[in-house]
Image (cartoon, helix red, strand yellow):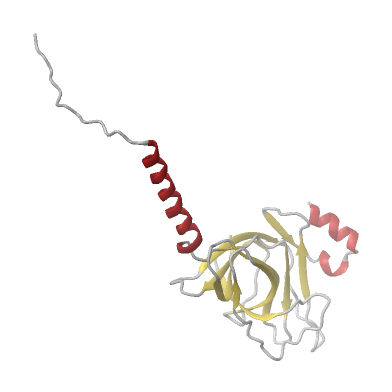
Amino acid sequence: MFHLSLPNIALVNIEPKDFIAGTSLLISLFTAYWNILRGAKFVSPPLRWITFGRLPNQVLIINFPISITNIGSLTGVIDAFYIEFRNLSSRQSQKFYAWKESILVGQEFNYSQPEIPTPIALKSGESVVKYYVFYPDSLDFMYACGLHTISLYAYVNNSQKPVKLYDKKLDIDSVLNPSSFSNEIPLLFSYNLIPTKILRVSNYGAEAPMMSMIQIARK
């Protein structure tokens, strides 16, 4: 008959006060990380309305609002924004950079003088909404009808590379034609009343009455 002998194992006797002290230390370390070391973190919901415009020199511009919130623990600074506009069929993409703070629909838009947007500084928990006009990297770029994605990026201070905030899919069924008037900017715009996976961009925006626009936006 074989006998298996085990070495004596000393069991650690933890006092309740020691357990409470250790737990408190872990909570303190986690709280310090959450409140101090976590830094700034920005989030933004995908766009729900967008406007395409064509300047008198035929350059395509894109306009939409950005709602940005700092859910991190420290104050953060966003130096600039840009978007990547990609055709899902051809896989061709074009970068557009935040060029002006303005709204193309319903307001006088001065395109002759660029106004570089100022950086955004947000404390922990703060939010802001900005309306940007984006200018293309290539001046002769023009989109085609079909499915596209817009990816929004932010240049965050002290980050080594741009931060991607979201992707939004667009279904575009109209192309902007040049205007016959030298001082007119033709527009193509669309919006959704509720968040959807795909935003349809059609020419109904400039011609249809408001109620029909709302009905289409609900689809």
Residue 30 locus on image (x, y percent): 45, 53
Q: Nearer the viewer, residue 194 or 33?
A: 33
Identify the residue at image location x=46%, y=58%: 32
Could you tell me if residue 188 is visible in this image? yes
- Left or right of 20: which side holds 1? left
Quarter of the N terminus within the rendering: top left
Identify the residue at image location x=41%, y=49%: 26
Q: Which of 52 and 6 is in front in this view?
A: 6
The answer to whether residue 167 is above or below residue 18 is below
Residue furthest bottom as drawn? 113
Residue 178 locus on image (x, y percent): 75, 80
Q: Tag count in the figure?
A: 0
Residue 70 locus on image (x, y percent): 59, 65
The answer to whether residue 202 is above or below residue 23 is below
Q: Which of 48 and 92 is in front in this view?
A: 48
The answer to whether residue 54 is above or below residue 83 is below
Identify the residue at image location x=36%, y=41%: 18
Could you tell me if residue 91 is visible in this image? no
Residue furthest left as drawn? 1
Residue 101 locus on image (x, y percent): 69, 79
Quarter of the image for residue 61 reads: bottom right
Quarter of the image for residue 138 reads: bottom right
- Left or right of 107: which side holds 89? left
Identify the residue at image location x=74%, y=86%: 56
- Left or right of 32: which side holds 128? right
Quarter of the image for residue 134 reads: bottom right
